[in-house]
Amino acid sequence: MAAEHEHKHVRVAVIGTGFGGLGAAVRLRRAGITDFVVLERREDVGGTWHDNTYPGCACDVPSHLYSFSFAPNPDWPRNFSGQPHIRAYLEDVADNFGLRQHIRFNTEVQQMTWESDELHWRIDTSRGSYTAEMVVSATGPLSDPKIPDIPGLESFEGKVFHSAQWDHDYDLRGKRVAMIGTGASAIQVVPAIQPEVRSLTLFQRTPPWVMPRMDRKITGTERWLHAKVPATRALRRQALWVIRELQVGAFTKHPKQLGLVEKLASAHMKRAVKDPATRRKLTPDYRIGCKRILLSNNYYPALAEPNVDLVDSGLKQVRGNTLVASDGTEAEVDAIVFGTGFHVTDMPIAERVKGADGSTLAESWKDGMEALRGCTASGFPNFMTIIGPNTGLGNSSMILMIEAQLQYMVDYLRKLDTLGGGRTGGRVALDARRESVRAWNAHVQDRMARTVWNVGGCDSWYLDDNGRNTTVWPGTTAEFRKVTQEVRLEEYDVLRPGTGKDAALAGTAAAGKGADAIHTGEGAR
């Protein structure tokens, strides 16, 4: 167990113990690197699957694809597993790969500062300080809940909480409850609590597209077969992956092809919602896929129940225990549950990272997040983000993207070893060249211009305050794996103690004039 006020130097510091952080720890150990620490602000592993415990919480990606390739689980109970099973899976990963010895729980990162003279990061935490040659930030974009600034909310006399901070001590039975938002969490919460509450008022600013959730129990025979014949498990995963890779073109190049999917979603709604007026409220006016497509078999049936009131307007203000929508509709409630998402394009961790010039990552990203290959930002040497800018997905498993970035991390460390002449050859750092980052970002934004997320006619959390999509990857997971297979040194400046940038690499062709210079690794678009 770590001392209460520990100060220690490590080669790598990993932040977070969700899929990204635990995956990084496994890959580090497999690469022969054991001099690392994993800093976790909670009391146990799991990341977002530790924090989100709201009723009905589950994944919308099939379990056999939403798991590490190096840690297959033949015993998934359902096609789409719930939060308890996913959290248990991550706990098993931590135990089976011997990761807990590296983890410091209840340790929140307060500040990370690059110290140029020493070529390392100083990390101040709630339980002491560390220095590290490299930092891998795996805090994830779905880690810090966002509650909108609603006038009068402080005057509300009832209970208020976010879906990601569910208050299990508060009994909703017999209560008048307001659900704010209609995102992925809300459509799971609504049917889970509807049978228990006295009334449920759903404030809907924008209706989502909802498709059937093709969920079922995985039979004992299937689970036995996956355990005894691993090839069947691998084949199942491969099939799930291929199906989703084939869908990418409709999202990224031919959004009009999604019209058929809209008809399927509309038919799904009509089967459960018989009232034409309610169906009109629930029908989006944007192309399906522009916002995250949601999966549920019980959301629409719950809305059709007599104790549910759908308010087709966002929450505008609170007057005591009365909630007032933008269209003037009022509802008196005992509790408010916010399903209003997370800080995605303005990740709070960015405010705690100070780079080479003393600016924070948040300041560097004030005009929009951008990182070379979704991993590294200029001016922040030896700092890597897992699930960084433009690495999100609209239709497949983020674990595939995480594993691609972990390969990049391992090669990054390998390059540092080579440049330093081995671990005893001297310290060295890599700093993504500003020109390389800009060229990469220009390439990504050029591809993004015709995707459904940009032309689908909606305002989503994929977009930042400037209307730019800084979250989603506009291609297949195979493409991303290819472009993160290795670190290209021509895209970086090499830093050494007291000498600044390595003259041998400064000013190379990686400065790039356009995307052609950055080795995108893709074929014809």
Image (cartoon, rainbow, N blue to C red):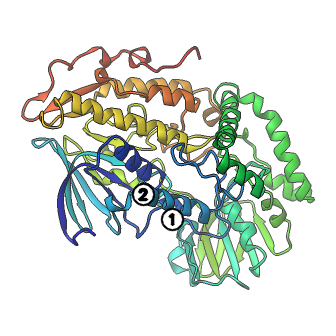
What's the residue type where badge 1 is placed? His
Residue that extends furthest to the left in the rendered view of this protein: 498
Give percent across and percent down for residue 238: 66, 36
Give percent across and percent down for residue 19: 48, 52
Residue that extends furthest to the front in the rendered view of this protein: 228
Query: Helix or strand or loop: what does disc 1 sit on?
Result: helix
- Choose between 384 and 277: the one closer to the eye: 384
**Which quadrant of the rendered structure holds the N terminus?**
bottom left
**Which quadrant of the rendered structure holds the C terminus?**
top right
Relative to residue 456, is residue 462 drawn left or right? left
Query: Helix or strand or loop: what does disc 2 sit on?
Result: loop
Question: CA separation, marks 1 and 2?
Answer: 9 Å
The mark that comes first in sequence, 1 or 2, is 2
Q: Report the residue at 54% width, 40% height from top.
A: 400
C-beta proximity under 8 Å, tags 1 and 2: yes
**Observer able to see residue 148:** no
Q: Which residue is mark 1?
A: 50
What's the residue type where badge 2 is placed? Thr
Q: Report the residue at 82% width, 45% height from top.
A: 265
Is 515 placed above or below 349 here?
A: above
Is 516 placed above or below 221 here?
A: above
Is 240 placed above or below 313 here?
A: above
Q: Which residue is mark 2?
A: 17
Give percent across and percent down for residue 194: 76, 73
